[in-house]
Image: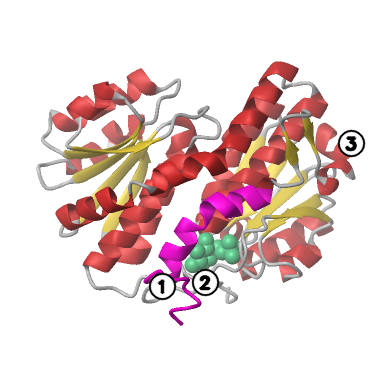
Amino acid sequence: AAIEKGGYDHFMLKEIFEQPSTVFDCLRGRVDAANGTITMAGVEANIDILKNAPRILIIACGTSWHAGLLAEYIFEELCRTPVEVEYASEFRYRNPIVNKGDVIIAVSQSGETADTLVAIEKAKEQGALIFGIVNVVGSSIARVSQAGAYTHAGPEIGVASTKAFTAQLAVLTIIALKLGYEKGTLDNKRFLHLMNELQDIPEKIPAALNQAEHVKQLAYKYKDARDFLYLGRGYNFPIALEGALKLKEISYIHAEGYPAAEMKHGPIALVDENLPVVFIATKDSYHEKIISNIQEIKARKGKVIAVITEGDDVIAKMADDVIEVPAADELVAPMLSVIPMQLLAYYIGVAKGLDVDKPRNLAKSVTVE
Ligand code: G6P
């Protein structure tokens, strides 16, 4: 088993550290920034349907749903197509509106999640095109899909999803870039810029991983907290949700993810000197806004742990602790800012002596409804 784990203590840690190569593998043969081209057969074969789709519905569960939520922001920005993100378990049991011409994107690591599978079967009957973004080749969701793209992250053993998530983000971003370009909603200059930014991500992930020892120290500092709050805005809001989910799954600490500006409508009541608040606050168009949110927490004596862009002295001075990640365009930065979220959950779980690869009550793939 030690050999299978490649010298790491747990599969989860191994999989977190594999991300430079899994994201690279996911981009390989698809994104060619030097020549300004994107190759993705599943998109090309259905380009007219995708271009004309009145709506894109993204259906998923768990971590895959978080990738879908981020994709909503990316698709609406680059493709100007209205997107809705649905929990498969909610979508399938109501009388969902699906019109011919709508595109359904199903996101699933295992390709076997029962709720997602039934939801897309139902939407297929209603005339939508099903585009699957799946990790496991030949899985049920891959087979039901009429088009798709594999994430190529390799087998994920740890129950808490890590490398599959960053691969899902990479694939969804590639599709949005291609579609935005084809639709003409994304100009050539930005298309090229974002392709380069995306292609640089595998080279930037190691710098985020280099924070592991520092994150481990923070884990020991904060491991006895009863609750955690995770806050982010814009593209980093789904990362706040994902950070909170990872912590719940692995450390059994109650955690809540929230849009940073929405916290004043509730969660702010929880803030006191015992509450660690994780801000995903990399430099983006919301930066000034999130700085004032950090001040709001500090004014109430909350403990602030901020994920920041390297060299951001402004937040470094305000926060109790910071974790740095390399600078990147805000649209691709979540593939970096999620790394400290994964590491923090992992090390807190380890510090609490828990079985991080097999957390209680959870399953790697939920094939029951
Ligand atoms: C389970 C797993 C999660 C995963 C979710 C969706 O809850 O523990 O890690 O995100 O299912 O799984 P899928 O395979 O469809 O992505």
Mark 2 in CB contact with mark 1 (< 8 angstroms): yes
Q: Residues within 10 Å of mark 2 (few under 14, many from 20)?
A: some
In the rendered structure, the answer to whether residue 35 lies left or right of residue 340 reads right
For the residues labelled 2 and 1, the Cα–Cα distance comes to 8 Å
Q: Amino acid at mark 3?
A: Asp
Residue name at image x 43 percent, y 34 percent: 326
Q: Are marks 3 and 2 in contact (CB under 8 Å)?
A: no
Q: Determine if the magenta segment contains residue 314.
A: no
The residue tagged 1 is 357
Residue at the spot of label 3: 48
Residue 236 in sight: yes
Q: Position of residue 208 (x, y in %)?
A: 40, 43
Q: Which residues are magenta?
A: 1-26
Locate the C terminus by quadrant: bottom right
Q: Which residue is drawn at the image coordinates 83% and 48% (left, top)?
A: 42
Q: Foreground: 222 or 299?
A: 222
Which of marks 3 and 1 precedes in the sequence?
Answer: 3
Crowding at label 1, few (<14), some or many (≥20) Cα neighbours within 10 Å? some
Q: Nearer the viewer, residue 65 or 345?
A: 345
State the SS at label 1. loop
Picture quarter containing residue 117?
bottom right
Provide the residue designation for mark 2. Answer: 157
**Amino acid at circle 2:** Ile
Badge count: 3
160 on left or right of 22: left
What amino acid is at disc 1? Asp
